[in-house]
Image (tube, rainbow, N blue to C red):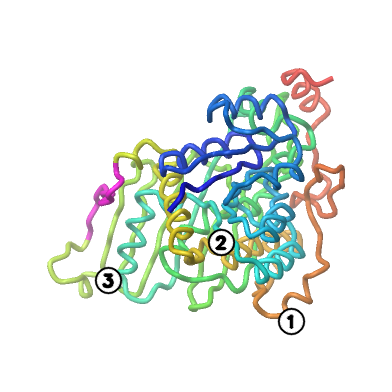
Amino acid sequence: MKKLRIGIFGTGRRGPDIARNFLLLDCDVVAICDFNKERRERAASWLGNCVVQYEDFASFIEHDMDTVIIANYFHEHAPYVIECFKRGIHVYCECISNGTMAEGVELVRAHEKSSSIFMLAENYPHMIFNREMKRVCSGGTLGKILYAEGEYNHPANPMDISFKKAYNYFEKHWRNFNPRAYYITHSLAPIMAATGATPKRVTCMAVFAPTEGDVPVTSYVGDRAAIVTTQNDDGSVFRVTGCAAFGAHHNAYRICGTKGQIEILRGMDGKIMLRYNAWEKPEGAEEVTCYMPSWNDRDEELIKTSGHGGGDYLACRMFTDCIKEGRQPEHPFDLHSAINMSSVAILSHRSMLEGGVPYDIPDFRNEEDRVKYENDRLSPYYGTDGTEPTLPCCSHTDFKPTEKQVQLYREALGIQ
């Protein structure tokens, strides 16, 4: 098979980081696109200056390539994914897949007419501890899975100016309006992958505790966490946090069955605790075992060089395997799973705004569900085109940073 020719749309941190893993998989990065010249040229220097640079997507998409990494702003992926579908170009899409419910409908309709392979570029299920949790769940020793937790907890130092310059470098940047429930795939996808379950109903409550004091922040989200609960297609229940900012930084997952449970020990560098009821433990097993999982993978040395605990490389390898074999990826990386997770994000935020009212998660394989949401374009974000938000981004809908905080942010970033 000839080398895959890959283009990158969006040359902030994630696009080039992902591309490095495709280079390890013997793919060629042939084109990059970003309206920001400085980011484009920096990415070109990382990837090799022979890569062709484009300023606009319309020109970029005409380049001769097999696959596009969609890594533009978090909430604006769908229109560009659809343009790839129209041309039969494969798509490796940063999460989430769609920023509105209507875009989810449009993605499905476009994909049904396309030969493109779509994969959600979600890396956390591939981390060593999450792979181990899936292996144990698949072995069946936990019994019927009843409950799982996923926490992606990522507090940030409000005085970290370098982070702001890299990640939310203007006042209307999506991160400054990002509801706590929306950035959900790092907490939800690992337990979906391990259990095989798909959310069907969602409810959500928020924890409001805005950043205080004279610090350089411009976030319009005063919530520290959105506590999301889902009822799933197999009868199980999930509790996930989206992107939280409480306590200390951690990624934590727990899965409980009728016979036992497995979880990551917080603050223990990925150490696993596997526990069984004494009367139901497998023959030869201990009632409680704490251990560091092993990769047991042919590419272990390459995995260890990759970002996000090896997840970046493994996710890229999964995608290239799908292309080589001419198949769509498995749950939860396929398009319908991606839209399901996006729907959980969008509708859990609405649940939170309404005091925890439950929402059913649509299945856009069904025309009835498509019709219900095909014109639903509510969004908490500003668009790159200047479109204003049509939905509050915080549980306290009138919350905003103080004038002093905004002034300090502008001064720190050199904004006039």
The mark that comes first in sequence, 2 or 1, is 2
Q: Position of residue 265 (x, y in %)?
A: 35, 49
Q: Position of residue 141 (x, y in %)?
A: 27, 71
Q: Position of residue 176 (x, y in %)?
A: 73, 39
Residue designated by label 1: 368
Label the magenta part by its dominant secondary structure: loop
Over which residues does the magenta segment extend?
288-300
Q: Amino acid at mark 2?
A: Ile
Q: Are marks 2 and 1 in contact (CB under 8 Å)?
A: no
Quadrant containing the C terminus is: top right
Give the foreground label among 2 and 1.
2
Q: Quadrant of residue 354?
A: bottom right
Q: Is residue 408 above or below residue 358?
A: above
Q: Looking at the image, which is closer to me, 85 or 380?
A: 85
Quadrant position of residue 303: top left
Name the residue located 74 percent from the left edge and 75 percent from the top edge.
370
Give the residue number, with chain letter if any, for mark 2: 117
Q: Secondary structure at mark 2?
A: loop
- Tell me which label, 1 or 3, sits earlier in the chain: 3
**Amino acid type assigned to the residue bearing label 3 in the image:** Thr
